Image (cartoon, helix red, strand yellow):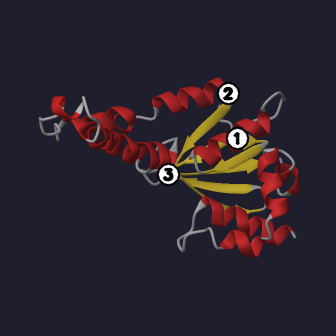
Amino acid sequence: MTTDTWDVIVIGGGSAGENAAQYAIKGSDRSAVIVEAELVGGECSHWACMPSKALLHPIELAECGRALAGVAQALNEPLDVAAIPARRDEFTHHHDDSGQVEWAAGAGVDIVRGHGRLIGEKVVEVTAAHGATRVLHARLVGTDVAELLHSATTAIVGKVDLETLWHAVPSYPTVSAVWLRLLESRY
């Protein structure tokens, strides 16, 4: 039988979503699910932060080495331009998120694949890649969930006004933008 009700539903399996889901249930009998259409781990793990650093680091090391007496003469060969993107692909596990899915399962967090959207209070509709839909229900919402968030997030929000936070959010919808909208509606 498929579970369609959890205490907490997190839309988006990036690092913020992973942490929110884990924190919401850690040390409790609560349940959580992450709804993710692409790869668990999100932008940072698979397309942005980690892969870009994996590409840049060998180049930076070579430049530093070429500027260092005693090392520069050993670095006369050009960089292996095929090896650098191969290193990036190793860092992203060739866009295989099975390790992060395994982590989620070990943390007690379920994964539902598809695009999630709110269709009512405590109700999320998930559309899978093949078009099938599934409706998920949450037991907790709003301030119930806010109390489960990491204290660092609460401290930041408590010390910085929402207007200032909006200046840090890009123009396209992001997880940060969604959280700020939720905070605005609460205060």
Left or right of 56 in this view: 134:
right
Disc 1 from disc 3: Cα separation: 24 Å
In x, y percent, where is residue 70?
A: 24, 29
Q: Circle 1 sits on which residue?
A: 21
Work out whether 181 lies above or below 71.
below
Residue name at image x 17 percent, y 28 percent: 74
Work out whether 117 lies above or below 103.
below
In x, y percent, where is residue 3?
A: 68, 36
Work out whether 130 lies above or below 101.
below
Q: Residues within 10 Å of mark 3 (few under 14, many from 20)?
A: few
Q: Is residue 4 visible?
A: no
In x, y percent, where is residue 27?
A: 82, 27
Instruction: Give the label, 3 or 2, closer to the camera.
Output: 2
Kindly indicate the quadrant of the structure image that contains residue 108.
top right
Closer to us: 145 or 63 = 63
Disc 2 from disc 1: Cα separation: 9 Å
Q: Circle 3 sits on which residue?
A: 132
Check residue 107 in the rendering and tell me which mark sits there, or answer none. 2
Query: Considering the numbered disc 3 on the image, is that residue within a helix, a strand or a loop?
Result: loop
User: Of the residues under marks 3 and 2, which one precedes in the sequence?
Assistant: 2
- The answer to whether the residue labelled 2 contacts the one labelled 1, judged by CB atoms less than 8 Å apart, is yes
User: Of the residues under marks 2 and 1, which one precedes in the sequence?
Assistant: 1
